[in-house]
Amino acid sequence: MAKINKIKDRKLFRVRYKNPHTDSWQAKYYKTKEEAILAKAHWNKIELMKKNNMDWKGELHADKKALTIGEIFTKYRNNVLTKKNDVDTKAKYNVVMNSALKVFPDDTIAETIRSMSQDINGSIVDGWKIYMDTCEYIQGRARRGINSYLRDLKNIFDWALEEDYVSKAIITKNDKYTKSELPVLMYKKWSREEIDALFNHPALDEFQKDLMWMYAVMGSRANELTGRNNRKPHKELHWEHVDFEAGTILLLQKRRKTREIVNVHPSVMVILKKWHERGYKRPIDMYYSELHRTLRTISQITGIDFTCHDLRRMKAQLLRKRFHSAKVAGHGIGDNSETVVEDHYAGISLEEQAKINNGMFEQLTAITQ
């Protein structure tokens, strides 16, 4: 049951209660004891109604004004996004919220979206299918990207549900394209001939080959090795992060909060030492945009279509061929998800298939003979 505590230092009364949606303890603060007593009685009533399978949701929101999606987004920006440090995360969620507002006006009551219907391309669709079809057929967006936006919108509305701004789920896990409705993922698969032609092309200069070698052997994401990043200067790679004696680099990888020591192959350290001796200000003294242009130039010279991320894929594919393991390939590029490796970097290789088939043959013949 709910409890009241007086916070002396702040001259406030704290009411601790169980969130009926999550059954977790939460707290709200009130300026007067009378307000706190009323709040305690309110939450005790909600808790008893839930235990007795009564309409606690109706009671919870009986006196509340139904919020619009515009109001919910404003609350989310003010209470959640302002606390986040990552500029990309803030930008991503703002883009996602704006995408919803391009389909549903900001004065749309959030809890009415699932009951709405609209004609899209001659078909009457309901709820979030309106958003999905508008994004795909009118705005020309890809289904995987739409699913990604729906996932982030669900995070926002789930937060609103936990904070009691809405009385029911606005988006559910079913509001997305299913796996069978998504296009097959296509990514670059390197051949031996392409790799050989790329690193031995006579028209490429020494720096171009060294740059590709560094990214291919390390398998790092583009911005983890670039030396300049205005939006996230803390991610820049400087010489102070390189330990020539130990053969390691302090790398700030994706979703990590601090730099971690990673082993660097001697062939990469040779390149870094050469650049350091030549007086380069930073290991890769360029912004991502410059890196992208450099690799596009190499692509045009060699006639091989690839990106920096494809060099990362190259490492994963070669590791999978060598060790017959998606797990090892994932560790090699700093990604622990075998599913991600399978779907985006290196599916099962012919060599791995051959090893499996040979193993089956050996087991079968051992039994039958």
Image: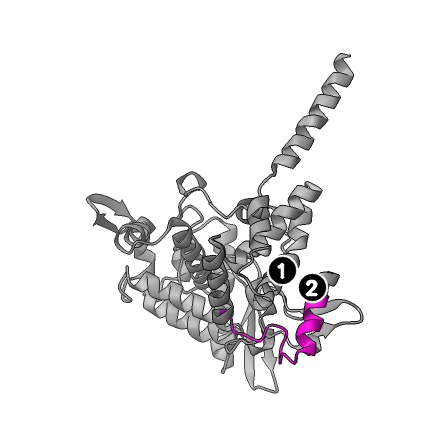
Residue farthest front in this picture:
202
Residue at coordinates 69% horizontally, 64% vertically from top-left? 268
- Element at label 1: helix
Residue at coordinates 75% horizontally, 13% vertically from top-left? 368
Of the residues shown, which amino acid type is indicated by label 2?
A: Val
Counting from the top left corner in percent of width and height, residue 70 is at: 33, 68
Q: Which residue is mark 2?
A: 268
Q: Is there a contact, CB below 8 Å, between mark 2 and mark 1?
A: yes
Counting from the top left corner in percent of width and height, residue 233 is at: 56, 78
Occupied quadrant, residue 56: bottom left
| In front of the other: 324 or 193 | 193
Counting from the top left corner in percent of width and height, residue 198 is at: 56, 54
- Residue 213 has which mark? 1
- 152 horizontally vs 13: left or right: left
Say if the magenta span includes residue 280.
yes
Say if the magenta span includes residue 263.
no
- Element at label 2: helix
